[in-house]
Image: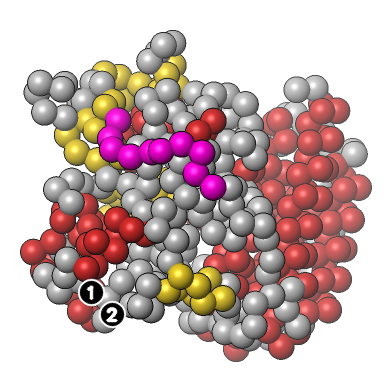
């Protein structure tokens, strides 16, 4: 892309992203904006001012070298200083002030976008810092969407239903043994934990062609899966008992669930959502399978056996379009299994991108040759066995913050996120 192309792309992505933030915050009144709807989440008004503050820190001050807009509030919106449960007690900007602040910051960013060189420093090469900020705001937009799901009150969000299944999808796909390229060294806006590209050699394995659906998960529930410690790890069973889990979050146990303020019958063919890692692990054990490793997930999503190379996405290298995946909050639910046949991988694995974040069995860590960039706190401080990796994005994830190499991570107890899973198993010798 030329320098002008990058600037035009950045301007368009900044605008598109902010419009999504506005929808999520304008949908509720000021009381709902400042209220904490769950101790797991920040007040919506905190997220709104936080994305503005990060934009100011990285683009106005660092990239642009401009004077601070509101240096006095930096500590209020430092996510490492204040746990989410404590943020309502802070002297936060009110709704009107937060909106005015984000508008002022954005005006300064658009002004410097026309002037700042996009070369000479790694942070500005190919517009990286701007792409990082776009992705950061989109990630908080998904967080705000999750807050809306936890909100109590009349529905305020509207969206068209997802497409119906266009193909019957079931069973498993065989992924042959051999090496593939994992991660990326070429994606211009890829974050540090996606880098560098490296070769991983895997034995043959089978992976579900679609995420586990509500109907499949209901079978586990009906079979007494939550009452039998046989299927759970020691830590998982202890958490199940301590948290009183009986089914996915927002299920009522009578064939209905609540989604964004509406109580509706479960849709059998939809991927199950709002399950924690321990629940996914238990289901997989009950089904005689396991969760895929992160490398297995990525090979199924990216490896093209015809060329021997890894694609950007399961369907190829082109950016996601509506026909490929359920992304960007176009719909307020996962789509039924088989709804996106044009988004399938060469191995016939469906809906790897969008719909639900998929738990993997892997701990979050750096790839060989990992280097923190542009700051340790984005990824490196989270490395270790406390966090499990999720892949693929959800219906609430934007295409700017989702690609075949993108990595998400969270505690294994988390269920408020739009998380689901698919299963895998090692291939028998005759299949391998």
Image coords of residue 71 (percent x, y): 75, 69
Task: Please state if 170 lies on the left or on the right of 82 as rendered.
Answer: left
Cβ–Cβ under 8 Å for marks 1 and 2: yes
Horizontal side of residue 50 vs 2, given as left or right: left
Q: Which residues are magenta?
A: 164-173
Residue 172 magenta: yes
Location of the C terminus by quadrant is top left
Asked if residue 235 lies in the magenta stretch, the reply is no
Instruction: Determine the image quadrant of residue 74.
Output: bottom right
The secondary structure type at the circle numbered 1 is: helix
Residue underneath mark 1:
240
Q: Is residue 204 visible?
A: yes
Image disc number at residue 148: none
Residue drawn at 37 percent across, 25 percent down: 347
Residue 312 percent across, percent down from the top left: 53, 28
- Foreground pick, 195 / 62: 195
Residue 305 spot, x, y in % from top left = 38, 15
Please name whichever residue, 99 or 20, is drawn nearer the observer in this view of the structure: 20
Q: Main secondary structure of the magenta part?
A: loop
At 23% from the left and 74% from the top, the residue drawn is: 240
Identify the residue at image location x=56%, y=41%: 325
Can residue 66 be seen here?
Answer: no
Q: How is the image coloured?
A: secondary structure
Q: Is residue 87 left or right of residue 410?
A: right
Badge 2 is on which residue?
243
């Amino acid at each position: 892309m030329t320098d002008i192309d990058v600037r035009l792309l950045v301007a368009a992505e900044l605008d598109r992203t902010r419009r999504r933030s506005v929808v999520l915050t304008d949908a509720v009144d000021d009381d709902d904006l400042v209220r904490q709807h769950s101790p797991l989440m920040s007040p919506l008004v905190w997220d709104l001012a936080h994305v503005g503050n990060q934009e100011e820190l990285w683009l106005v001050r660092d990239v642009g070298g401009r004077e601070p807009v509101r240096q006095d509030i930096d500590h209020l919106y430092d996510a490492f200083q204040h746990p989410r449960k404590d943020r309502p007690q802070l002297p936060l900007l009110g709704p009107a002030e937060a909106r005015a602040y984000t508008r002022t910051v954005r005006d300064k960013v658009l002004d410097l976008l026309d002037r700042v060189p996009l070369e000479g420093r790694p942070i500005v090469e190919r517009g990286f810092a701007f792409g990082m900020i776009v992705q950061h705001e989109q990630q908080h937009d998904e967080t705000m969407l999750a807050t809306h799901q936890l909100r109590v009150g009349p529905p305020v969000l509207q969206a068209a239903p997802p497409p119906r299944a266009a193909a019957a999808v079931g069973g498993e796909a065989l992924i042959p043994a051999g090496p593939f390229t994992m991660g990326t060294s070429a994606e211009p806006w890829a974050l540090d934990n996606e880098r560098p590209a490296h070769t991983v050699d895997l034995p043959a394995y089978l992976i579900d062609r679609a995420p586990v659906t509500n109907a499949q998960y209901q079978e586990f529930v009906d079979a007494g899966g939550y009452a039998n410690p046989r299927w759970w790890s020691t830590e998982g069973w202890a958490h199940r008992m301590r948290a009183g889990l009986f089914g996915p979050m927002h299920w009522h146990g009578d064939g209905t669930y609540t989604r964004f303020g509406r109580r509706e019958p479960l849709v059998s063919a939809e991927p199950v959502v709002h399950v924690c890692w321990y629940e996914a692990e238990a289901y997989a054990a009950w089904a005689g399978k396991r969760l895929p490793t992160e490398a297995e997930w990525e090979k199924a999503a990216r490896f093209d056996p015809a060329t021997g190379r890894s694609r950007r996405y399961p369907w190829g290298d082109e950016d996601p379009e509506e026909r490929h995946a359920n992304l960007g909050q176009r719909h307020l639910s996962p789509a039924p299994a088989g709804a996106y046949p044009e988004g399938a991988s060469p191995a016939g694995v469906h809906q790897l991108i969008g719909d639900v974040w998929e738990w993997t069995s892997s701990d979050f860590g750096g790839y060989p040759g990992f280097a923190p960039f542009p700051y340790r706190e984005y990824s490196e401080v989270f490395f270790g066995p406390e966090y499990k990796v999720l892949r693929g994005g959800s219906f609430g994830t934007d295409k700017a913050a989702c690609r075949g190499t993108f990595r998400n991570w969270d505690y294994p107890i988390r269920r408020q996120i739009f998380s689901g899973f698919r299963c895998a198993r090692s291939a028998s010798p005759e299949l391998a």
